[in-house]
Amino acid sequence: MDKIFANRWLRLAALAVFAVLLIVAPLVSSRFINYQLSMIAVFAVALLGLNIVMGYTGQVSLGQSAFLGLGAYIAAYGVRNEWNLVLVLLLCAIIPAAVGMLVALAAARLRGLALAMITIALPIIGIPLARRFSEFTGGSQGTTVSFLGAPDWSGLANDQWQYYVVLTIAVVAFVLARNLVRGRVGRAFAIVKENESVALAMGVSPYRYKVLAFTISSLLGGVAGFMYLAIVQFTSPETMNFFTSINLVAAMVIGGSASIVGTILGAIYYVLVPVVAGQVNSSRTALISGAILLAVLFLLPRGLVSLPRRMSLLIGGTRRRGASPRDDQNSPDGASTADPGTPETPTAHEERQAR
Amino acid sequence: MAAELSVRDVSLHFGGVNVLEKISIDITAGQVVGLVGPNGAGKTSLFNCISGHYQPSSGSILLDGIETAHAPASRMASLGLARTFQHPALRLDATVLENVMLGAHSWLPGGPMSWSLRLPATGRAEREARGEALALLDRAGLAWAANVPADELSHGLHKGVELCRALLSRPRLLLLDEPAAGLSHGEVEKFIETIRGLRIDFDLTVVIVEHHMGLISALTDRVVILDHGAKLMEGTAAEAQSDPRVVEAYLGKEVTDDESA
């Protein structure tokens, strides 16, 4: 019990420190750093969407960049036509969600590679479409906008104000997503990923939850597109680039799939590693990024988020085993709990027998 | 509240193979019925038809008078049906409690919107489900394991967790697919006690697919013997064990108490 409490307080304290850092950081940093921090928030939201469909629900999605681009174009169109920004943000959520849902209604019946192919098609179709409809998108040149400048009363520079706006959106998205994956819906996602027969038996329709996961993923992709435009103030067909999708998948795996904290770590990786690699040796950026990717996956197959657990396993791997005799005191019925202290041998043995 | 199940002339064909051939079984509310037969007799296929995982090629399945032969499997939980699997498919990375909580899915209220906003109703229902889940685990002697990752438990304990998960869906008809498979002798004894306890405390109809005749004799009111996809006989466990047809099809060759462990 003490341990749980200590853990919870530790967590709250860490969260508070993190929050203060996030709020103070742009006030004391350069424009360059603020830009990078803002980009982390942008891609954290895009990754959050990807993690919901891929990490939590186990469905391959290689088209997240298409929704990022779609959101950015919708935002650019709305801004140029001087629509209310809240309305623009809502449209950036709703339209990609609707597109994602339509695609998923057809694609969610497929699995594995077939599903991956459909999602690959999205950026591949999206880019020529974006070039074609140049009156909306500015064609290959892309489109530049200028919006979300800091209001006078705030006393902030534009980059600081934009940072706070995207940070607020990201925090809201993360809180909502965290609530979602921790309850009824999250358990349904997890069992769809794990075993569809069991899902059915528990009253979970795998199809419906896959469509839901894709819809939420596209929604978050669209919102990230809005945030992207707010920071970069420019978008072009390149935003949809298929390689962005692939890099996002890599970042999700590196951060930690099916993990909220892992999503944030993945976004930090996604934004910062190319920057760091570029500063180390600007002609070897890809090579260095690739080496870091391999190193992380080799050392931490469950992603950066598993680093603390991995460390504690290395340091005190036997502690948990030693603690299990407490169980006997709690349970009046010793029969089944008599041997939790040595679960290893019977488990492996019985499982072999069961097969 | 226990459910009444009526299987009428159910056939199941996969391509040219007749897996089930006009099976009819009536199970009255509150009975415990064993479904017995050699491997490949169609027991699990019949289970899958009842639970909606397979759609029978013909025939009808009535759960409390409601036709469910073609209902989607995901609807069956809300009609009061719960089942376990031969291999308890738990999420090994999740805690035992999280695994059990999935059982509450069919009766927890609210969609994605209300859960992401954590509306008060969802919080209340979640706490209620958690309380129920912990009570079920406690009952199964697994309270100590609630916060332990499932992969740290043995196969026998997985079966117990899976049973708790099924019970949390508040079923009226419980289908148990080979609950004793892979269990040690002591675990089987304990399982028999658990099911006896369930009959008293929960108002349940239970159907068990099992090879373990000790378990079948100890628990069931009636057994149905299947062979080659057809019903061979129906009666008490004792009648079945002395029936020459059954002995020939199945029991004479295989059954001993520790053989199925």
Image: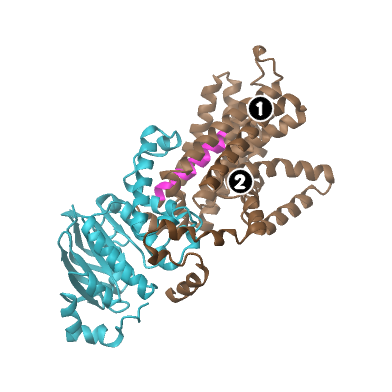
Chain colours: A brown, B cyan
Q: Residues within 10 Å of mark 2 (few under 14, many from 20)?
A: many
Q: Residue at x 26, y 84 (%)?
A: B251
* Residue farthest along the top direction in this orientation: A153
Which quadrant would residue A229 be assigned to in this image? top right
Residue A103 is marked as none
Q: Amino acid at mark 2?
A: Gly
- Residue B2 position, x and y percent, is 19, 55
- Read off the residue under disc 1: A23
Badge 1 element: helix
| In the image, residue A15 above or below residue A57 | above
- Residue B253 position, x and y percent, is 29, 87
Query: Quick check: B157 left or right of B93?
Result: left
Q: Which residues are magenta?
A: A207-223
| In the image, residue A260 above or below residue A190 | above
Residue A262 is marked as 2
Q: Residues within 10 Å of mark 1 (few under 14, many from 20)?
A: few
Which quadrant would residue A150 be assigned to in this image? top right
Of all chains, the one bearing label 2 is A
Query: Could you tell which of marks 2 and 1 lies nearer the N-terminus?
Result: 1
Q: Residue at x 66, y 22 (%)?
A: A161
- Residue A216 position, x and y percent, is 49, 40
In depth, the one of A255 and A90 nearer the eye is A255
Quick check: can you spot residue A116? yes
| In the image, residue B189 above or below residue A110 | below
Query: Quick check: B222 left or right of A249?
Result: left
